[in-house]
Amino acid sequence: MQTITIREALNQAIREELARDEKVFLMGEEVAAYQGAYKVTKGLLDEFGPKRVIDTPITELGFAGLGVGAAMVGLRPIVEFMTFNFSILATDQIINSAAKMLYMSGGQYKIPIVFRGPGGSAFQVSSQHSQAIESWYAYFPGIKVVMPSTAADAKGLLKSAIRDDDPVIFIEQERMYGNKGEVPDDPDFTIPLGVADIKREGKDVTIVARSLMVPLALKAAETLEQQGVSCEVIDPRTIRPLDIDTIVESVKKTNRVVLAEESHPFCGVNAEISTQIMERAFDYLDAPIKRVSGADVPMPYAKNLENLAVPNVDKIVAAVREVAYLD
Amino acid sequence: MASKVIMPKLSPTMEEGQIARWLKKEGDKVSMGEPLAEIDTDKATMEMQALSEGVLRKIIVQEGESAPLGQLIAIVGAPDEDIASLLNEAPAKQAAPAQQPAPTPSEAPAPRPVAEGNGRQLQQAEPVTSSGRIIVSPLAARMAAEAGLDLRSLQGSGPGGRIVKKDIEQALSQPKPAATAGYPRAVEPARFQPAAVATASPYRDEPATEIRRTIARRLVTSLGPVPHFFLTSEIEMDRAAEMRKGINALDPDLKISINDIIIKVTAAALIQHPAVNASFQDKFIRYYEHADIGVAVAIEDGLITPVIRSADQKSLSEIATEVRELAERARSRKLKPEEYTGATFSISNLGMFGIDEFTAVINPPEGGILAIGAMTPRPVVRENEVVVRQMMRVTMSCDHRVIDGATGAKFLQTFKKILENPLYLVV
């Protein structure tokens, strides 16, 4: 077991898969010579050469389409977006080509591609560069959406995503690249897609959290433990396909749910999770499902306003106390 | 873990449901949300969905049988799991209508379990009842249904008076108070509340007692859905009165009353008119072999109808002894449920209050009830002469779904014939 950062875990996953399968290659803006805007691809150009690690021009739609074409003829591209904010330019290739190709070709073309990069809020990069857009991609049948919250999950899930035959949107969190965690040494360590992880067991309230919200939910759970409330923290890890069974089982035990997410509340992933809980565990709910979400405004630049726009530990604690009828 | 399948509430007014069809057999796999059975409610046939996964281990309530809300009707669990403890919770088997020629009246629907009142404070805010709507979390609603708990008896601790899991757990953990304990008595004038409008009368609110609420619920299930019609007859009671005097002269300890004779005569007439000794059960009509006569007894803050089982087969002295004993225990609230439920026909007598004639409300699912007025000397015409006779008026309420006018009239004719000539009882 090694203790490494999420950045290093992602780097290991890409390196190991590049070494394991020569069909795998990496491309994106600044991934090669500059070693990645966030240094996730450090050392890969030296190790695998310019045929496998490719710098692209600033043309998101172009290189995303290039990746889809490469996947159609049998390669396994990893396409890095410097941040997922820039993937917005490439959505035609992601949604109209990658997600639908298998279906529209009658099963003739698999698209084993990974689109990866950081998403969500960062530190004072303002509205256009602080967006959690996982609900966009999760909306479409044909794409998988993965969001790790620990170093081990980052490595295990990215390796599975690269080996997966379907297009995968793999959203990292800019604020979390430096977070450290234990990661198994086994080079074949993978975590299956579509399986949620119970990050903490509890009996009174279920907190469903992903990405940046997971460490916050765990801190909230610690605080609440001292207040006599036992929280179960579930990280779906994969947004689509969603492991709703694990969530529903937990709700049946605790009868109360708080859903935490960084994204806007309207049409967010938690709106979907909330509905599915209601559909499948209505008779087990003792309180209305409570969401804690990012503010329904473009991300402000000002530090104080930015802090207010992103969910924090206190907001999660307050939500849990509300559904537990403590206040 | 094996889980109980209970009779769900599938309509707002449903009190019991009948299994129309099981969609799964014992041993079939069941997944959550899958239709398990079709249930006839008071309104429609509804599909019941499985709330757990596993194998349908045991069907407890068969097709065609009914069960009250919250009663265990089946068990779902793992194929090899021990379900003995859950099976023990199943109530004694109810008779299926078709195969059983002589269902005994004790198998008539058991009274619904009703939670004990919780001694609610008079001045306490009651968002739950004042809006006429109960606010309850889905989980708490399900827990209450499973436990047979009446949500109206609970005070919700959640926002806006919402009844939540904690309230149900609390209610279930409280020991049930003895039936006689602590009904609020008339309160001191100081506790009258001023009315909102200055000129309107002040009032006080007292919590409705369990028995008052049960009476209310039972009676609105009658005059509402049960189409009543009424038949009145005047009966000459001189011979019955003579017979009573004669018997009591034989043995003063017997203390036979006119009411005892009426019970016996009613039972005898019912046996001659089986169409009246019947009850409407929605999908079928249930005819009873014996006449189990419910006798309305007034008690403090209510009434109750202890049942004389198989009155047609009992002697007058047996009936007299039994009525006295049951009435006494009714007044001290010591009757067991099986002693006051499941009559096939009832009698209500207000003669002792000087009431000449009245109509009574049928106690469902019985087909009828006799309202007995006072026995008074009246001038009547016999053989063209005005003479004085002991006259008594009886009014029979009939459930028109099972008894028609002529059917009821013929029964009443027989009743009158026997009561006017009680020697018919011995021929």
Image: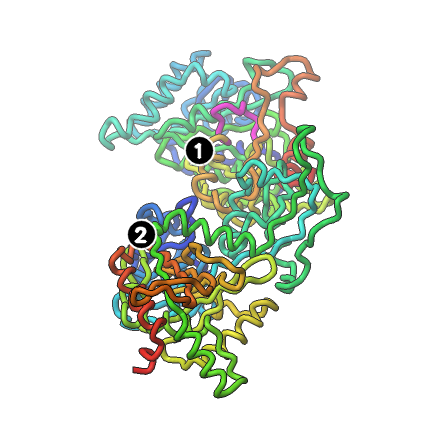
* Other residues around mark 1 within 10 Å, as few (<14) / some (14–19) / many (≥20): many
Q: Mark 1 to mark 2: distance in Å?
A: 58 Å
Q: Nearer the viewer, residue A153 or B354?
A: B354
Q: On the picture, is B156 further left or further right than A271?
A: right
Question: Where on the picture, by quarter, is residue A111?
Answer: top left
Q: Is residue A200 visible?
A: yes
Image x and y of residue B44, in percent: 32, 46
* Residue furthest out toward the right: B190
Q: On the picture, is B160 further left or further right than A63?
A: right
The magenta segment is A261-270
Instruction: Find out whether residue B237 is within the magenta segment.
Output: no
Instruction: Find out whether residue A266 is within the magenta segment.
Output: yes
In the displayed structure, B290 sits above or below A154; it is: below
Q: Which quadrant holds the C terminus of chain B? A: bottom left
The kind of secondary structure element at disc 1 is helix
In the displayed structure, B426 sits above or below A247; it is: below
Q: Report the coloring of the rendering.
A: rainbow
Image x and y of residue B126, in percent: 63, 40
Image x and y of residue A60, in percent: 43, 15
Q: Is residue A183 visible?
A: no
To which chain does the residue with label 1 belong?
A
Which residue is under mark 2? B38
Which residue is under mark 1? A18
Dominant secondary structure (helix, strand or loop) of the stretch shown in magenta: loop
Q: Nearer the viewer, residue A179 or B176?
A: B176
In the displayed structure, B242 sits above or below B160; it is: below
To which chain does the residue with label 2 belong?
B
Amino acid type, callout 1:
Leu
Q: Nearer the viewer, residue A146 or B424?
A: B424
